[in-house]
Amino acid sequence: QVQLVESGGGTVQAGGSLRLSCAHSGRTFSRYGMGWFRQVPGKEREFVAAISWYGGDTYYADSVKARFTVSRDNAKNTVYLQMNSLKPEDTAVYYCATGPKRIATTVLGDYDAWGQGTQVTVSS
């Protein structure tokens, strides 16, 4: 059974940085695309970033382009989200997701396993 465990969330001032990590276990990590999504209370979960199985393709939501960077280390079964120049509107619970597709996809329904989420709070 696939397990995803996010870490690295916290509270930071606007303009600051955080790096989220997502540790994957339960199937062959390197075969699957990975995604990051976020959700605030009362709103739907929204796409943030995605990376293909080999890391060569990445996609970002327009709201985070040039500020966030997604990467993966297949040897460590871990995907990362480096978040710079954080804004109060980035405040949300951040979730990582995996597979079953190998590609990087922005579609929530394309993922079949999710982590429990990590809270990111950006104060103004």
Image: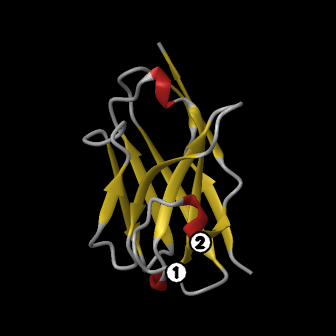
Residue type, numbered disc 1: Phe
Residue at the spot x=38%, y=73% of the render?
A: 52
- Residue 29 got which mark? 1
- Residue 24 got which mark? 2
Kindly state the secondary structure of the residue where label 1 is placed: helix
Kindly state the secondary structure of the residue where label 2 is placed: strand
Horizontal and vertical percent for residue 11? 56, 27
User: Is residue 44 found left or right of 71 in the rendered image?
Assistant: right
Crowding at mark 1 (Cα within 10 Å: few <14, some 14-19, many 20+): many
User: Given contact means CB atoms under 8 Å apart, are the residues at marks 1 and 2 in contact?
Assistant: yes
- Residue 124 vs 44, above or below: the answer is above
Q: Quadrant of residue 93?
A: top right
- Residue 112 vs 58, above or below: the answer is below
Horizontal and vertical percent for residue 123? 51, 17
Residue at the spot x=49%, y=61% of the render?
A: 35
Residue type, numbered disc 2: His
Horizontal and vertical percent for residue 6? 61, 55
